[in-house]
Amino acid sequence: MPTSDDDLTRTTAWVVDRPGPITSAPLGRAGRTIPEPGPEELQIEVAACGVCRTDLHLAEGDLAPRMPRCTPGHQVVGRVVRRGPEVQGFSPGDRVGVAWLAGTCGRCRYCLAGRENLCPDSRYTGWDLHGGYAGCTVADARFVYRLPEGPPDEELAPLLCAGIIGYRALERAELPPGGRLGIYGFGASAHLTAQLALARGAIVHVLTRAEEARRLALELGAASADDAYGSPPEPLDAAILFAPVGDLVPVALSALDRGGTLAVAGIHLTDIPGLDYQRHLFQERTLRSVTANTREDGRAYLAEAALHRPAVHVQRYGMDRADQALADLAADRVTGVAVLIGD
């Protein structure tokens, strides 16, 4: 825990200096004053922060910056240092998690209908607000998750985005009980989602280009693992596309059985080529996007993960090596999930 007034007001953080290819070193380190927590905010000392492909999209400019010199990171595990005067339910020392969804208006028709992930005024950690590639951060307590004691920080951090967005993608895919699920791409979110589907009784087929990722998929219980452009051994009831590769959309759609659904889980996707109606969409095949998540998604997933604790395959990096972690992610040198460990 910080021990002096200066410790509580200053932190070292990574910032996106100039968005561009990861080889151009878009990230830099800087000292930053931590804002006092607002009336409904928590000040949090960062113990670990998962590295997400969305962070890479932000650094490389695939996602337009929403604030100058933004600090990435939205899978934050830490301890409460201070709380705002209107915060209830949290105290200094509590173990908490900060996820992608950072705030919504609470008044629009989407929020009122329980679809806050579609709120036009939604805000996101590490995009609209500074995130967890830092020693300390602040977050709206209404969007912070209480975390259990026990599991290591680095195992909990990926659940806060990779796990939650995978949960929502699986729900959007409408996989029937005992159904056949195809997973395209096998990184951080996919390896957690596969375990969730298996715990629910699904048959899982993984299609990904990395040989090491295919080996991991089989170790976790997948029925098959093939190249991303290969064909699963049987028609699929549902599929989830985690790889940000639009070329794989028709590939996955053609692998669906009649009435199957493909859910695209990424925030960024390269262009989708032309679809052939008969091959890709006829027979009531469905193509769906997945947009962020609701807090209820987060609570539901974390509760399910506590019952069926996933094996989180972690590559650990010191907080001072965030640039290397993103470079490794860009080069497909990460199997499972990369996690930054706090200083």
Image (cartoon, helix red, strand yellow):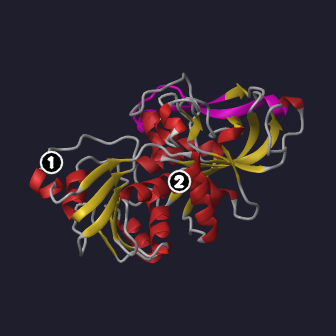
- Percent x, y for residue 199? 50, 73
Residue at 61% across, 59% down: 302
Span colored in magenta: 7-30
Would residue 22 be counted in the magenta stretch? yes
Q: Give the CA distance from mark 2 to mark 1.
A: 30 Å
The amino acid on which the numbered mark 2 sits, given as a three-letter code, is Ile
Residue at image position (44%, 67%) is: 194
Q: Nearer the viewer, residue 173 or 251?
A: 173
Count of numbered circles in the view: 2
Q: Position of residue 92 (x, y in %)?
A: 85, 44
Residue 180, placed above or below residue 55:
below
Relative vertical location of residue 30 with respect to residue 208 in this rendering, above or below: above
Indicate whether residue 237 is drawn in magenta: no
Q: Is residue 50 left or right of residue 165?
A: right
Q: Amino acid at mark 1?
A: Leu
Does residue 139 lie above or below 160 as drawn?
Answer: above
Q: Secondary structure at mark 1?
A: loop
Density class for disc 2 (Cα within 10 Å; few <14, some 14-19, many ≥20) is many
Q: Tag 1 or tag 2, which sits nearer the N-term?
A: 2
Q: Which residue is mark 1?
A: 275
> On the image, numbered disc 2 is attached to which residue?
164
Residue 307: x percent and y percent?
62, 70
**Residue at left 76%, top 61%?**
149
Q: Residue at x 24, y 75 (%)?
A: 233
Vertical comparison of 10 with 320: above or below? above
| Residue in the foreground of this view, choosing between 330 and 296 | 296
Residue 232 falls in which quadrant of the image? Answer: bottom left
